[in-house]
Image (cartoon, rainbow, N blue to C red):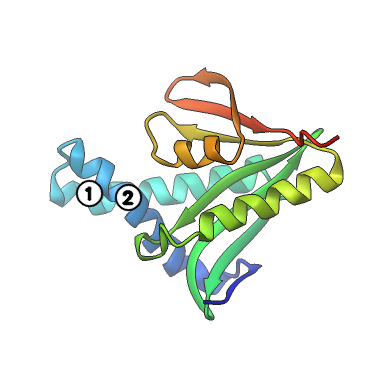
Amino acid sequence: MKVTLRSEAALDRAFLRALFGEVRVRELRLAGMDQGLLQPLLDMQFEAQRQSYRQAYPLARFDIIEVDGLPAGRRIVAQAGDALHLVDLALMPAWCGNGIGSAQLRGLQREAAGAGMPLRLHVALNNRAEALYRRLGFKETGVSGMRRAMEWENDNE
C-alpha cells in the first residue's frame, strides 16, 4: 500500500463532496434526519465548510491523500502564527483503521518539531479520533462549544 499526498485540484470536487458526505451522514442519520432533507443539507454544509476553510486559511496546504494512486482522504494544514494547525484530516471509511491517519499525524509532528512549533487541532466532542490524538501525545487545551482544542509539543527540545 503506497500512500502519497498531492495538492487538491478542481477535479477533486466530486471526491471531496463524497468524502464530506461519508463523514457527516452517519451523525445526521443518528440525529433522525429525514432522508429527503439529507442530501440538500449535506450539499449546503459542504459548500459552507469549503468556503469557510478557504477564507480562514488562504495560505493552507489543501492536499488529497492517495492510496495506490486513488483518492482516499484529504488533509488541510496551515501555519497559524507560532503553530502548525491541522485544520482537517478525513479518510473514506474503507481506509480508516489502516494506519493512514496515524502516519499523517506523525508526519505533521515531525514537521512541527523540525520548525520548533506545536501542532494544534480541534476535534468534535465524542469523536473517536480523539483517542488517536491522545495516543500520539496530544493534550487538551480547552473546550469551546462542541469542539475540543488539542496541542502536541515536541518533548525533545
Q: How far apart are marks 2 and 1 (CA)?
A: 6 Å
Residue shown at 45% from the left, 51% from the top: 47
Percent from the top left, x then y, of residue 2? 57, 76
**Amino acid identity at mark 2:** Leu
Disc 2 crowd rating (10 Å Cα; few below 14, some 14-19, many 20+) is some
Query: Quick check: marks 2 and 1 in contact, CB under 8 Å?
Result: yes
Above-or-below relation of 52 to 98 = above
**Residue highlighted by disc 1:** 38
**Residue highlighted by disc 2:** 42
Residue shown at 60% from the left, 27% from the top: 139
Percent from the top left, x then y, of residue 42? 32, 50
Residue 1 vs residue 122, the one in the foreground: 1
Secondary structure category for the residue under label 2: helix
Left or right placement of residue 63 versus residue 24 in this view: right
Left or right placement of residue 127 versus residue 151 in this view: left
Percent from the top left, x then y, of residue 26? 25, 47
Q: Residue furthest bottom?
A: 69
Left or right placement of residue 22 versus residue 130 in this view: left
Total residue callouts: 2
Quick check: can you spot residue 59? no
Q: Quadrant of residue 153?
A: top right
Residue 26 vs residue 153, the one in the foreground: 153
Residue 111 vs residue 56, the one in the foreground: 111
Q: Quadrant of residue 64?
A: bottom right
